[in-house]
Amino acid sequence: MEERVFVLNQFCTLLLPALALLVSFLLGSEILKLRALLFSQLCSLAFATCAFIAACAKPFDWRFSWLASILDFRFDFFSSCLLLVIAFIASVVLFYSERYLVGDKNRLSFIRHLLALSTVSSLLVVSDNLVFSLLCWNGISMILWRLLAMRQEAEGAAKLVLQHHLASDFLLGLAVAILFNCCHTVTISQLPESISELSKSVELWGYTMPFHLGAVVALLLVLSMSIKSALFPFHRWLLATLEAPTPLSGLLHAGVVNVSAILAARLWPVLQESSFVLIVWGMLASLSAVAGTLIMSAQSDVKRKLVFSTVGQMGFMCLQCASGAIPAAVFHLVAHGLFKCHMFLQSGSAVSEGLLKKRWNFSEQDNSDSGLAPSTVRLSLTLTGLLLFVALPLGLWLWHEHSVSSETALSVLIASAAICTSLSALKRVNFALLFASGVFGLLLVFTSDLLAHMFDARIAPELNEQNWLLPVAIVAFALVALARYLVSARELGKAFYVHALNGFYVDHIAQRFFAGLKVPSSGSASKETI
């Protein structure tokens, strides 16, 4: 009985938005159409919440096949968690869009496409079929292209986004074709049973290559996911979305770029067949994390800051996937999606606040509300920092007593360090508020730790991990941060700042490269001759 209730809630979460899209074409007035779309999304969120509560109370793993195994669905704790996140973010973005686009002629079409994008993403989460997952993967690309192409001035950006995403779709299609040819199944849950077929060596023109089919498939999957998640240097398509409407940016950065963790979680048995490819992916992800963070720190535009922040965050998420820390990557997906959606939707208010402060010549020195002496500020920062660093022994205790994974413990330390580095922004508040923010931050850290422990136990209890990859990358991050601090006041640091401000010229190099590949038409050639 409990399993039927869980499955029914999952199905309702998926079907209600799709049915509302169909009904919206039958209703008369635009107001009724909008109400139907928004109400269906709220109902979908309610069903997703009930399914998640049921999954937390009792773990389920229910699989369903329909239409000759073309539609294979898998409902488990992983799917219930992500469906809840997608439904919540989609609800917030849709209601925001309904107010944000008042008076826009494309408001109804825009909301329909947003709802379709969240529905396709939800179908990807529950898909247990390679072909159906490929269709969802491509559906995300096409809907995103249509959303960007609604504005005539953004046609060039929409074309660039489509080119990158079609390249990702093509690579995933090749991987699916090889998997079906070798394993003779398109059901994802059945791949581990025939995964040994991927250990065969590749033969080309009668020669045996020094790598096997598993490495080829893993490389295709890694490249496809790296492009979709906008890892450096494949992030050009994400920069092209800077002029997109704010609701689309919120859903894009909160959902679309995170789909790599979903695919990696489902296809991890295939990815772990080639440890070399995972190491290469981890190195690329580490480069993206470092480059994205450095470029973000040099930007002054709010949206460009958020874009490069996403590039860095996706690098860290893919690093977790490459190291086998799938539960930590899924937790990162959820946290980053909620955080980045909030940041984009309130970016307009932040800009308005900054312009207002500039207009009235506001500065830290002019703020006399707190009246804190420099020594008091230093003491407050020190005490709060010591409080937060209590996370270290408590994190080790949780690791020892509750078998929390090493990746989760590292995530706790990273979160604590991030909170400590943000304390300098709290100079203008009094000590009580500063202390309260430290306690609240510590509470968030350990709540996150407990949730991550639950993910470890229920999403992927047994994984063949690259345990050394994530700690080595974090040490490398610390060395990069130290080097940046040491050279920041020198000429080398100033020169490096200019390079970071320009995104290390990746966009300029790509533009020149693709411009050089274009063959001039006969008309242009004749003009040059004249």
Image: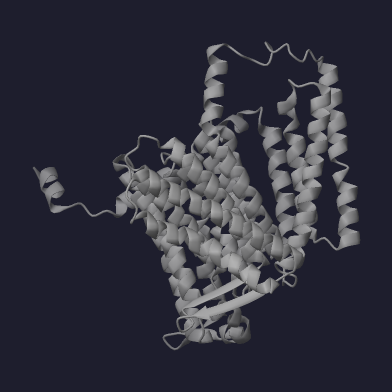
Q: Residue 75: x and y, percent?
A: 61, 70
Q: Which of the 4 quarters of the picture holds residue 260?
A: bottom right
Q: Residue 347: x and y, percent?
A: 54, 33
**As displayed, is residue 273 above or below residue 476?**
below
Q: Which of the 4 quarters of the picture holds residue 46?
A: bottom right
Q: Answer left or right for 106 relative to 392.
A: left
The residue drawn where x is 32% and y is 42% is 151
Observer able to see residue 340: yes
Q: Answer left or right for 112 relative to 95.
A: left
The residue drawn where x is 74% and y is 26% is 426
The residue drawn where x is 72% and y is 68% is 465
Q: Pick the residue in front: 111 or 158.
A: 111
Q: Pick the residue in front: 274 or 83.
A: 83
**As displayed, is residue 123 above or below residue 158?**
below
Observer able to see residue 283: no
Q: Residue 236: x and y, percent?
A: 44, 48
**As displayed, is residue 197 above or below residue 300?**
below
Q: Pick the residue in front: 252 or 510.
A: 252
Task: Check the image and name the residue furthest to the left.
Answer: 530
**What is the tally of numbered marks visible in this picture?**
0
Looking at the rendered image, the quarter that the C terminus falls into is top left
The residue drawn where x is 55% and y is 74% is 73
**As displayed, is residue 3 above or below residue 318?**
below
Colouring scheme, one of rainbow, by chain, secondary structure, one colour: one colour
Q: Residue 283: x and y, percent?
A: 62, 58
